[in-house]
Amino acid sequence: MVLLAMWLLVSSPISMAILVALLGLLSFAAVPALQARLLGIADTHAPGAHSVASGLNIAGFNSGIALGSLLGGATISTVGIAYTGLTAAVVSGLGLSLLLLQIARSRRTEYAAVDSRV
């Protein structure tokens, strides 16, 4: 919602300052929840692989930064800087959709834990 509001209120410096602050707060507030979810999934499917899961979490964040830079640059070069908020909102919506699909799928499927002693 913050990203969509940024697109809508791009011409208001005060609104943008507030929205940028909210974006930072909400983005960093999500990190512990994402880390906990990832470690929980790793514990279910591959007990003892927490360090690998944590490394994959960081790799995912770095991939997101690279993808965001690529899409932001493409957006600015094609339609202008005012549309970066809309692009970010669409990409965030796609990410949320994938998360919800994953949660729904994991509730339907039971997995056997991997034996880490092999």
Image: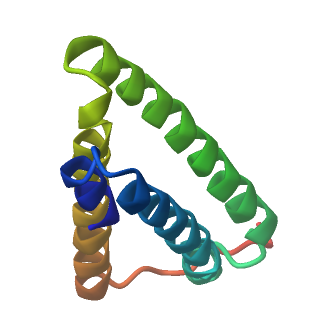
Side (left or right) of 107 relative to 22:
left
Which quarter of the rendering shows the N terminus? Answer: bottom left
Q: Position of residue 23 (x, y in %)?
A: 48, 63
Quadrant housing residue 116: bottom right
Q: Residue at x 27, y 34 (%)?
A: 82
Q: Residue at x 80, y 73 (%)?
A: 117
Colour logic: rainbow
Asked if residue 111 is positioned above or below residue 19 in the image, the reply reads below
Residue situated in front as seen by the camera: 68 or 47: 68
Side (left or right) of 104 relative to 77:
left
Side (left or right) of 6 relative to 39:
left
Quadrant housing residue 50: bottom right
Asked if residue 2 is positioned above or below residue 79 in the image, the reply reads below
Outermost residue on the top side: it is 77
Q: Residue at x 64, y 58 (%)?
A: 57
Q: Position of residue 2 (x, y in %)?
A: 33, 65
Residue situated in front as seen by the camera: 17 or 93: 17
Q: Residue at x 49, y 29 (%)?
A: 69
Q: Position of residue 76 (x, y in %)?
A: 32, 20
Side (left or right) of 112 relative to 88:
right
Residue situated in front as seen by the camera: 4 or 18: 18
The number of callouts visible is: 0
Quadrant housing residue 113: bottom right
Which quarter of the rendering shows the C terminus? Answer: bottom right
Residue situated in front as seen by the camera: 113 or 101: 101
Asked if residue 20 is positioned above or below residue 70 in the image, the reply reads below
Q: Position of residue 7 (x, y in %)?
A: 24, 48
